[in-house]
Image (tube, helix red, strand yellow):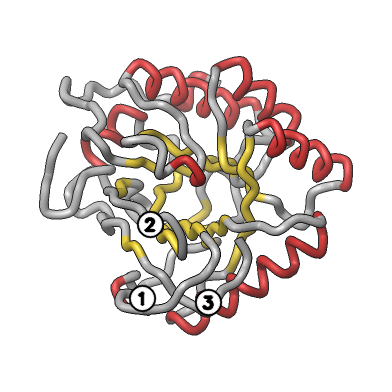
């Protein structure tokens, strides 16, 4: 384990092969949680069939968005995804669209990010970190009102279902008290060794909650109209290209489609 992109967060290095983490989306309903620089781009050739799989929802996280290099990487990816036919959606649009790309901004200044997204016709999940200033929080809330952002809260994943539910509930409460608005989207801070399979089969009903864990970034429908939607996302690293994301990393479990 080592630092990536100059960040203090640590992640296991993604491999460009079928060994890349490929966790299919798990759709759950449960009753525990309430609340609604160009040099970075690797130009190695990639397969010509680097294209999205019909109907799939992809989720990819970006960090270091407070740097010119981080914003450049995001803007280049947005251009590629648009050319590939992927529209940009927010979690509450999962029922309205057949597929698309969910961009997750894990850090950065909301004003700079808003300008980039508006310029390129995109939108993103924006993680509301405690280090944000009151001015940044107010601007992010305005962007959410305009439909450019969907607000999310970070949480520590923990080592089992009980931990994950308790940590999400605590994170949601803290975010709501700080910004004065209920948050229904959550992003895990670091990947854990255990998979998400142990969360299967939990019954109950709750207001819609979207939880992003770590995986390949490839998610398949159908998505429930209420309850928890558990999606996996991949963390964007400069070692690979957007083409490689679609052709080698984000592939369906047991499908191997490219």
The answer to which of marks 2 and 3 sits earlier in the sequence is: 3
User: Vertical placement of 164 versus 67: above or below?
Assistant: below
Percent x, y of residue 114: 68, 27
- Residue labelled with disc 1: 199
Percent x, y of residue 161: 44, 80
Residue found at x 22% / y 44%: 251
- Residue labelled with disc 2: 224
Q: Is residue 127 left or right of residue 134?
A: left
Give the numbered dot on residue 165.
Answer: 3
Count of numbered circles on the image: 3
Quadrant position of the C terminus in the picture: top left
- Asked if disc 2 and disc 3 are in contact, CB closer than 8 Å, the reply is no
Which sits in the foreground, 98 or 115? 98
Q: Which tag is nearer the camera, tag 2 or tag 3?
A: 2
The answer to which of marks 2 and 1 sits earlier in the sequence is: 1
Q: Is residue 52 left or right of residue 1?
A: left
Quadrant position of the N terminus in the picture: bottom left
Tag 1's secondary structure? helix
* Distance CA(mark 2)–CA(mark 1): 16 Å
The answer to which of marks 1 and 3 sits earlier in the sequence is: 3
Tag 2's secondary structure? loop
Q: Quadrant of residue 143?
A: top right
Residue found at x 51% / y 27%: 73
Residue found at x 63% / y 33%: 147
Residue, far right = 134
């Amino acid at each position: 384990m080592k630092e990536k992109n100059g960040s203090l967060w640590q992640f296991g290095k993604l491999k460009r092969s079928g060994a890349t983490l490929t966790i299919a989306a798990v759709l759950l309903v449960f009753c525990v949680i309430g609340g609604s620089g160009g040099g970075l781009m690797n130009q190695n050739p990639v397969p010509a069939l680097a294209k999205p799989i019909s109907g799939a929802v992809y989720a990819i996280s970006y960090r270091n968005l407070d740097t010119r290099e981080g914003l450049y990487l995001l803007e280049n990816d947005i251009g590629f995804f648009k050319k590939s036919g992927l529209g940009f959606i927010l979690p509450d649009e999962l029922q309205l669209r057949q597929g698309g790309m969910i961009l997750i901004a894990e850090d950065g200044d909301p004003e700079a990010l808003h300008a980039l997204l508006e310029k390129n016709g995109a939108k993103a999940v924006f993680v509301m970190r405690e280090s944000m200033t009151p001015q940044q929080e107010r601007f992010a809330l305005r962007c959410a009102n305009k439909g450019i952002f969907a607000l999310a809260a970070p949480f520590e994943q923990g080592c089992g279902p009980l931990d994950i539910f308790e940590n999400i509930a605590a994170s949601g409460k803290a975010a709501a008290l700080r910004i004065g608005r209920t948050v229904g989207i959550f992003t895990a801070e670091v990947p854990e060794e255990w998979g998400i399979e142990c969360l299967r089969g939990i019954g109950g009903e709750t207001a819609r909650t979207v939880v992003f864990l770590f995986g390949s970034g490839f998610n398949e429908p159908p998505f429930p109209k209420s309850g928890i939607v558990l999606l996996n996302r991949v963390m964007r690293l400069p070692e690979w290209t957007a083409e490689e994301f679609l052709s080698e990393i984000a592939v369906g479990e047991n499908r191997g489609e490219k």
